[in-house]
């Protein structure tokens, strides 16, 4: 029993806590993947999680807007003009993964 408790305590210590929405505020640049193709993009995230940005397709810049929200479980989700999905931050990289499996994005924070 003590071994099991030690294992559970060790695994709990390894679990990562999702960042707060407010900690994501700022300028982010990266790439988006949509059914239209892949392209560069930028986002400006407000402290309340709302964001605006642009996807730069050849000859047709597309506005992006939405919000990142925290679920009661603590996980992050986005609701946007391009659909809904999950939000994670790994090693400083903001990742959005669409529920449809066809859309996604990776961004890094800009100074």
Image (cartoon, helix red, strand yellow):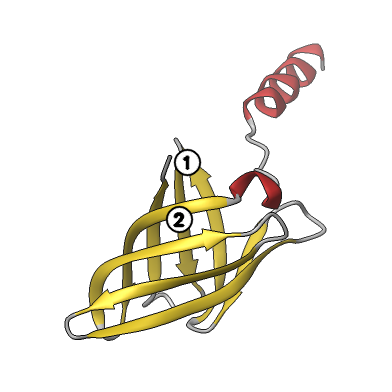
The numbered mark, 2 or 1, whose residue comes first in the sequence reads: 1
Mark 2 Cα-neighbour bin, 10 Å: few <14, some 14–19, many ≥20 = some
- From the top left corner, tell me how far across and down residue 59 is, in percent: 18, 85
Q: Is residue 102 above or below residue 110?
A: below
Q: Is residue 100 above or below residue 25?
A: below
Q: Is residue 75 above or below residue 68?
A: above
Q: Residue furthest left?
A: 58
Residue drawn at 47 percent across, 41 percent down: 90
Residue drawn at 54 percent across, 50 percent down: 26
Q: Which residue is mark 2?
A: 95
User: Marks 1 and 2: in contact by CB < 8 Å?
Assistant: yes
Q: Is residue 57 above or below residue 31?
A: below
- The image quadrant where one finds the N terminus is top right
Q: Nearer the viewer, residue 47 or 36?
A: 47
Residue drawn at 27 percent across, 74 percent down: 56
The CA distance from mark 2 to mark 1 is 8 Å
Residue drawn at 73 percent across, 25 percent down: 8
Q: Which mark is residue 68?
A: none
- The image quadrant where one finds the C terminus is top left
Left or right, 105 with reference to 89: left
Q: Which residue is mark 1?
A: 90
Left or right, 56 with reference to 90: left
Left or right, 102 with reference to 73: left
């Amino acid at each position: 029993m003590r071994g099991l408790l030690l294992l559970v305590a060790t695994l709990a210590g390894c679990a990562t806590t999702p960042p707060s929405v407010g900690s994501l505020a700022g300028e982010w640049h990266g790439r988006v993947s949509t059914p239209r193709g892949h392209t560069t993009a930028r986002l400006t995230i407000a402290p309340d999680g709302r964001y605006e940005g642009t996807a730069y397709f050849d000859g047709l810049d597309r506005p992006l807007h939405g919000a990142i929200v925290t679920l009661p479980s603590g996980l992050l989700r986005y609701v946007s003009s391009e659909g809904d999905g999950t939000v994670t931050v790994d090693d400083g990289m903001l990742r959005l993964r669409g529920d449809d499996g066809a859309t996604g994005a990776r961004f890094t924070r800009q100074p």
